[in-house]
Image (tube, rainbow, N blue to C red):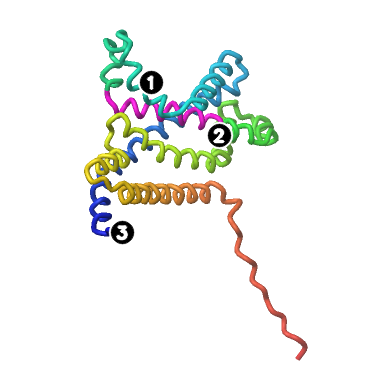
Amino acid sequence: MDFPFLCQTLLTLLPGVPLTLKLALSSVVLGVFLALLLALARLSGIRPLAWISRVYVFVFRSTPLLVQIFLIYYGLGQFPALRHSVLWPILREPYWCAVIALTLNTAAYGSEIIRGGLQSVPAGQIEAARACGMSRFQVFRRIVLPLAIRQALPGYGNEVILMVKATALASVITLMEVTGLAAKLISETYRAIEVFIVAGAIYLIINFVITRIIQALEHWLTPHLRSAPAPAVVEQGGPA
């Protein structure tokens, strides 16, 4: 193993980390809002909205993310109406096409996670809040949403990690994030094993930090599940 080359590879790939994090963060933040809307539409009881949400989730969960990126980056430019619209300055940029594809994809998975969290809220707590005179919006904001976040956080943490790894697909549309820089370096050095080892280590470190952050959030949001300190045992002496 050529350690000097590994160090040089690390220095070459590190400039791609900010773009990787930017893609992941943008898609996750935008995807959360879209996922919440899809989950609420699914649970609204309004058939057209529920049907649209079901179709959306089915389509984006049943097709590869790589195909979705290709369709958005290469496919949308085939329509003259889009090329002459105000959206074209955005849709012609690889970065925004990658963000749109990642956002639409993660929203489909995230909506199911959020829907499960919303459905896990005990009905008794909702009835108690309504009995206290809270409106439906207050019940949702103060009772349903906080409890749903606690339930959905572990599953959504996995989705965040998947999004970090999914940013590697952005390299196929010329974005020079970690995987894009790794592919470029391999084409120059023909040393795929060492380069991919370093690239994998970078993703491993990023996801390790993310898992620690998510665990800290779980610990903060669930104080009732924290282990209480063991009571002190007082030894009683025998008869004098």
| Quadrant in which the C terminus is drawn | bottom right
**Sequence-earlier tag: 2 or 3:** 3
Q: Is residue 177 above or below residue 105?
A: below
**Sequence-earlier tag: 2 or 1:** 1
Q: What residue is shown at x 44% (from left), y 49% (from top)?
A: 213
Q: CA distance from mark 3 to mark 1?
A: 40 Å
Q: What residue is shown at x 58% (from left), y 22% (from top)?
A: 42
User: Label 1 belongs to which residue?
Assistant: 71
**Residue 87 pos. (x, y %):** 30, 16
User: Label 3 belongs to which residue?
Assistant: 1
State the residue lying farthest toward the front.
Answer: 190
Helix or strand or loop: what does disc 1 sit on?
helix
User: Label 2 belongs to which residue?
Assistant: 113
**Residue 16 pos. (x, y %):** 28, 42
Q: Amino acid type of disc 1?
A: Leu
Q: CA distance from mark 2 to mark 3?
A: 43 Å
